[in-house]
Image (cartoon, rainbow, N blue to C red):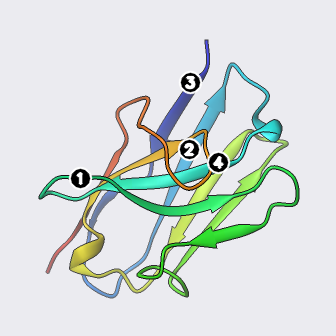
Amino acid sequence: EAQLVESGGGLVQPGGSLTLSCAASGFAFSNYDMSWVRHPPGGGREWVASVRSSDSGTYYTASVRGRFTIARDNAKNTLTLQMKGLKSEDTGLYCCTREAFGGACWGQGTRVLVSS
């Protein structure tokens, strides 16, 4: 059974940093483009970042470019999202997905709260 399990969320002050992790299992991780999406408290879903399977090329939504870094480790079947300079608008439920530029949450996600 294919699974994605996110971790690493928490409460952080504005300007702080967090690194999220996504452990993949049950499928050939290296063959898939992967993404992070987030669900803000007010609703909706926003694509955050993607990394290609072919060349590990990375892509970011404008609001996080320069602050967030997506990376994959195919040997460990792990996707990460390093977040720096966090802002209140980064608050939300973060999920990793098995798609480029979007996708739905499979599991619980990990919650990020940016607040002083």
Q: Are marks 2 and 4 in contact (CB under 8 Å)?
A: yes
Q: Which of 92 and 49 is in front in this view?
A: 49
Relative image position of residue 105 (x, y in whole percent):
41, 36
According to the picture, the residue beneath numbered tag 1 turns out to be: 44
Report the residue at 45% width, 45% height from top: 7
Secondary structure beneath label 1: loop
- Residue 62 circle label: none
Q: Position of residue 14 (x, y in %)?
A: 26, 84
Q: Distance between the residues labelled 3 and 1?
A: 23 Å
User: Is 88 on the left-hand or right-hand side of 50?
Assistant: left
Residue linked to disc 2:
22
Crowding around mark 2 (Cα neighbors within 10 Å: few <14, some 14 to 19, many 20+) is many
Label 2 SS: strand
Earlier in the chain: of badge 4 and badge 1, it is 4
- How many C-alpha atoms fall within 10 Å of the one at disc 4: few (<14), some, or many (≥20)? many
Residue 16 versus residue 49 in the image, above or below: below
| Badge 3 or badge 4: first in the primary sequence | 3
- Name the residue rendered at 41%, 81% in the picture: 63
Three-letter residue code for mark 2? Cys
Say which amino acid is labelled 3: Gln
The residue that mark 3 highlights is: 3
Q: Contact (CB < 8 A) between labels 4 and 1?
A: no
Q: Which secondary structure, mark 4?
A: strand
